[in-house]
Image (cartoon, rainbow, N blue to C red):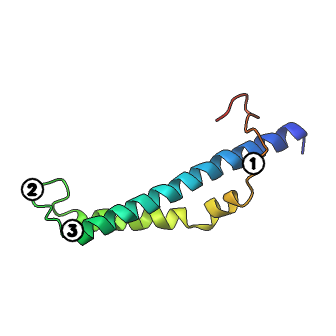
């Protein structure tokens, strides 16, 4: 594989891995918000959450499942911090 291709692959890995880390942080934030919601026993009647609390909770579980899956975690394990992630001509 040409050096330029290797650099593009590493750029992709680094940028995708950063997105995976961001997704993990988002999942953590959503789980925390759900915990706060539950602990305050809020009544959603008459709001956009009326009848949708279970669906939102299921969605939060799905975000966590994606964040914890093998693909993003595999990408994170292959980050090269010294790589500038500019192989596509710009920082993506």
Position of residue 49 in the picture relative to residue 85 (left or right): left
Q: Are marks 1 and 2 in contact (CB under 8 Å)?
A: no
Residue found farthest to the right: 2
Q: Horizontal placement of 71 versus 83: left or right?
A: left
Q: In the rendered image, which quarter is residue 72 located in?
A: bottom right
**Lower position in the chain sequence, tag 2 or tag 3:** 3
Which x, y percent locates residue 76? 67, 58
Residue indicated by mark 1: 81
The location of residue 27, given as percent across then percent down, is 45, 60
Q: How far separated are the C-alphas under marks 1 and 2?
A: 48 Å
Quarter that holds the N terminus:
top right
Q: Which mark is residue 70?
A: none
The residue drawn where x is 46% and y is 55% is 26
Q: Residue at x 21, y 68 (%)?
A: 40
Q: How many marks?
A: 3
Q: In this view, does 24 lie to the left or right of 39?
A: right
Q: In which quarter of the image is residue 62?
A: bottom left
**Residue pictured at 78% horizontal, 43% vertical:** 83
Which-is-in-front pick, marks 1 and 2? 1
The residue beneath circle 3 is: 40
Using the image, determine if residue 9 lies above or below residue 31.
above
Which residue is under mark 2?
46
Secondary structure type for disc 3: helix
Residue 66, horizontal then vertical, whole percent: 51, 63
Q: In which quarter of the image is residue 55?
A: bottom left
CA gap, disc 1 to disc 3? 41 Å
- Tell whether label 3 touches label 2 (CB within 8 Å): no
Spatial separation of the CA atoms under disc 2 and disc 3 = 17 Å
Crowdedness of circle 2 by 10 Å Cα count: few (<14), some, many (20+)? Answer: few
Sequence-wise, the earlier of marks 1 and 3 is: 3
């Amino acid at each position: 594989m040409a050096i330029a291709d290797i650099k593009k692959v590493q750029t992709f890995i680094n940028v995708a891995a950063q997105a995976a880390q961001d997704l993990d942080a988002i999942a953590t934030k959503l789980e925390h918000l759900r915990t706060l919601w539950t602990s305050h026993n809020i009544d959603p009647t008459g709001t956009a959450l009326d009848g949708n609390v279970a669906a939102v909770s299921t969605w939060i579980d799905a975000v966590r499942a994606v964040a914890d899956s093998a693909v993003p975690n595999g990408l994170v394990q292959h980050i090269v911090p010294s790589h500038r992630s500019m192989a596509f001509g710009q920082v993506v």
